[in-house]
Amino acid sequence: MSLSTIPISSNIDKALNKEADIKYSEFFELSIQFSLDGFSFCIYNNENNKLIALESYAFQELEDYRQLSSEINDLVHDKELLKRSYKKINIIFESPKSTLIPFQLFDKSELHSYLKFNHNVENWEIIRFDSLKNLEAKNIYVIPKCINKTIKENFGSANISNFSSSLIESLLIKYKNQNLENKVFVNLRSNIFDIIIIEGKKLKLFNSFKFRTKEDFAYFLLFALEQLKFNPEEIELIFTGAIEKSSNLYEIIYKYIRNIAFIESNDLLRYSYIFDNIPLHLYYNLLNINLCEL
């Protein structure tokens, strides 16, 4: 493991190390989420519908995707759990370039055109797409060729999806029978936050904003709510991702929005004792990917 990789947490059910290789290949699923800022993985036992492991790492000072590829190779080399044979492997990549197209408007031959409307596609990027069944839309995005190669070399025929695909689908699954009027979901990443607004079974908004300071964060979030004609005094703001109540981001937004909650764990899943003291909203996207048919 290189000096650029900083361990954040390691939570492994003691029973996991006692399982034979055949158990991994028949019942266990490995899910991984990574970006230039970090790498996390969890293990799910679909025999008893239970999450049984979670580890996370931060990357420092990575400047490009070739460096990220090298860090991933090092982690796989060092971590026995990443080298096992699993029934299924899910890879969530945080692509900064993506766009959503409804099923009825989607044409596979027009992938480049869809992305070109909002993004520049470089010659070192591959265009991919996910099918979001609950949203009835395709998510078109790019992945660097070097990252695609690293995934294939280390994880074979792993299922790759964009982070926004699993985030949107998991929210639609979790709240499919609930009234989401005046609810706003905000997912925090490193210096980026995503806003998701769902009405009924339809996605009203998904957008991402870069920010440098807590003031930037508050300004962009409140501006987006204003444009959508949401009253900060009437909405419920539900956080997922890299934010805690003690953070300065929470502190500043609480000045304007009082009804704030962290997303609750999904009751469609069971959790090992190792999760008892982990704020599950921090890893919501990763922990719920196995519920999504991506």
Image (spheres, rainbow, N blue to C red):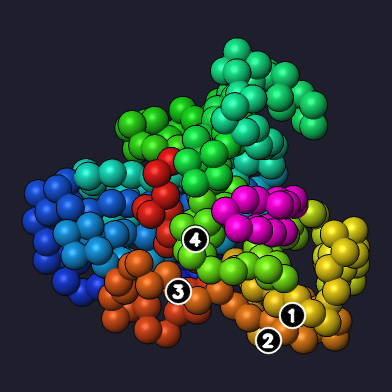
Q: Which residues are magenta?
A: 194-208
Mark 3 closeness class: few <14, some 14–19, many ≥20 residues within 10 Å = some
Nearer the observer: mark 2 or 4; the answer is 4
Which residue is labeled 4 in the image? 176
Q: Which residue is mark 3?
A: 265
Q: Is residue 82 visible?
A: yes
Q: Which residue corresponds to the image point at 69% horizontal and 42% vertical from the top-left? A: 96
Q: Amino acid at mark 2?
A: Ser
Q: Are marks 3 and 1 in contact (CB under 8 Å)?
A: no
At horizontal 28% and vertical 75% (from top left) the residue drawn is 272
How packed mark 1 is, by other alpha carbons closer than 10 Å (few <14, some 14-19, many 20 or more), is some
Residue 216: x and y in percent read 88, 65
Q: Is residue 45 left or right of residue 10?
A: left
Residue drawn at point x = 45 percent, y = 33 percent: 150
Q: Which mark is residue 246?
A: 2
Marked residue nearer the N-terminal end (2 or 3)? 2
